[in-house]
Amino acid sequence: MPGKRSPGPSVKDKKLYEDLREEGNSKGKSARIANQSAKQSRSKVGRKGGKAGAYDDWTVDQLRKRAAEIGVDGRSTMRKGELISALRNS
């Protein structure tokens, strides 16, 4: 990609960062994942977490409450699929 800029000195795994950005992830999310994978093995990063159930199993009320906690705009008029998408991409 011409004119590609370096992610900066704070990103530890620049290749992974660029791959994540090309997938459409935000700069912040890409940097967090790249730095965490540089700190631990990549397989551990993928397994980390997993304490919450899948959003598909949540009720619309639960999804709206979680969306309110993280500040998703327009959540009161969103359908379940839209809420799930907004939560996964925020």
Image (tube, rainbow, N blue to C red):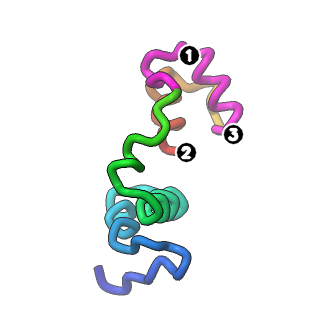
Q: Residue at x 67, y 38 (%)?
A: 70
Task: Give the number of callouts.
Answer: 3
Q: Which residue is mark 2?
A: 90
In percent of width and height, residue 65 lies at: 67, 23
Q: Decide whether the magenta segment is chiefly helix, strand or loop.
A: helix
Nearer to us in this view, 74 or 69: 69
Task: Mark 1 and mark 2 in contact? Answer it, CB < 8 Å.
Answer: no
Q: Which residue is mark 1?
A: 60
Classify residue 33 as left or right of residue 15: right
User: Helix or strand or loop: what does disc 3 sit on?
Assistant: loop
Residue 84's disc number: none
Residue 71's disc number: 3
Q: Residue at x 48, y 22 (%)?
A: 53
Magenta extent: 52-72
Mark 1 and mark 2: Cα distance apart in space: 17 Å
- In the orientation shown, which residue stands out farthest toward the left? 1
- Determine crowd level at label 3: few under 14, some 14-19, many 20+ residues with C-alpha closer than 10 A: few
In percent of width and height, residue 24 lies at: 38, 57
Mark 3 and mark 1: Cα distance apart in space: 16 Å
Q: Amino acid at mark 2?
A: Ser
Looking at the image, is mark 3 or mark 2 earlier in the sequence? 3
Nearer to us in this view, 46 or 25: 46
In percent of width and height, residue 32 lies at: 52, 59
